[in-house]
Amino acid sequence: MQVDGAVVVVSGAGSGLGLATARRLGAAGASVGLFDLDAELADKARVEIGDRALAVPVDVTDGTAVEAAVVEVVDRFGAVHICVNCAGVASAAKVVSRGVPAQLDGFARTVAINLVGTFNVTRVAAAAMLRNEPDAGGERGVIVNTASDAAFDGQVGQAAYSASKAGVVGMTLPLARDLAGKGVRVNAVAPGLFATRMVAGMPVAVRDRLVDMILEPKRMGEPDEFAALVEHLVTNRYLNAECIRLDAGQRMLPR
């Protein structure tokens, strides 16, 4: 699908991978709906991207709110052609620590945002895409979801995060199958360690240990490198039902 002239919805668009994706696709000529729970960050991104951006504060776990947000984007720009889900949280808790079981609420919150939230935005965006006239290549839309290396190599304390991201990987193929024959492709990216606000909150020693696990180049990824892969997934019509690891060969050790 061509980016220029398309309408994009990006969740988690106020910072990190979502902001980089919104910037890149906006610069390539797309109109962008910026979904983020933080209204201030969403509006800051809108100001940066310009007239073809719309900031929509929204909780991705709220079905009614997401439906209203997509309607707002369609009312403003006329359609939704591309959906990129980047909203997510990181959490850390051992299943049992010092004899005390992990808090169930923490596990449920992580899964709700990372997995249920991704499905929530996907389902509503996909419904909007199916109302589009197919382009010259027969496409109506493209969906790109964000998984994580932790889906495959979850570390100690990452049960909730790994489960939520493994769910994103696991639903890629069935979502693509659900939409097969309707002109909508679905892919996922599993990023490794990227220089985002989420990673900035880690202790320096933890970040350094994770960088040591990277093969080449031995550094954190830049958010625009993630956005570049998203753009390729959108424009390469033969990529469907795939989850691509973007991690410079990183394989995380238990700790």
Image (cartoon, rainbow, N blue to C red):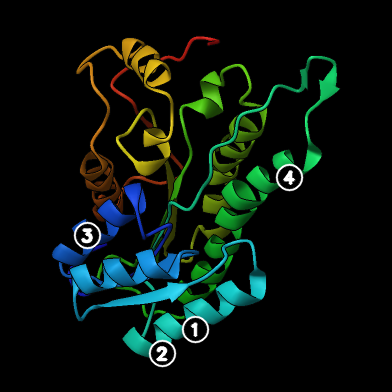
Location of residue 34 with respect to 54 vertically, above or below: above
Numbered disc in front, either 1 or 3: 3
The label number, if any, that marks residue 75 in the structure image: 2
Rounded to the nearest whole Å, what is the CA distance between mark 3 and mark 4? 31 Å
Locate residue 83 relative to residue 90 in the image: left or right. Answer: left
Residue in view at x 27 percent, y 65 percent: 137
Residue in view at x 67 percent, y 51 percent: 112
Q: For mark 3, what is the residue?
A: 23
Mark 1 touches mark 3? (CB < 8 Å) = no
Give coordinates of residue 251: x percent, y percent. 42, 14
Location of residue 149 with respect to 134 vertically, above or below: above
> The residue tagged with tag 1: helix, strand or loop?
helix
- Mark 4 neighbour class, 10 Å CA radius: few under 14, some 14 to 19, many 20 or more: few
Q: Amino acid at mark 3?
A: Arg
Quadrant where the N terminus sits is bottom left
Mark 2 touches mark 3? (CB < 8 Å) = no
- Mark 3 neighbour class, 10 Å CA radius: few under 14, some 14 to 19, many 20 or more: many
Numbered disc in front, either 2 or 4: 4
Residue in view at x 79 percent, y 14 percent: 98
The label number, if any, that marks residue 108 in the structure image: 4
Residue 3: quarter of image:
bottom left
Closer to the chain start, of discs 2 and 4, is: 2
Rounded to the nearest whole Å, what is the CA distance between mark 1 and mark 3? 22 Å
Location of residue 254 with respect to 85 vertically, above or below: above
Rounded to the nearest whole Å, what is the CA distance between mark 2 and mark 1? 6 Å
Q: For mark 1, what is the residue?
A: 71
Mark 2 touches mark 1? (CB < 8 Å) = yes
Give coordinates of residue 136: x percent, y percent. 25, 71
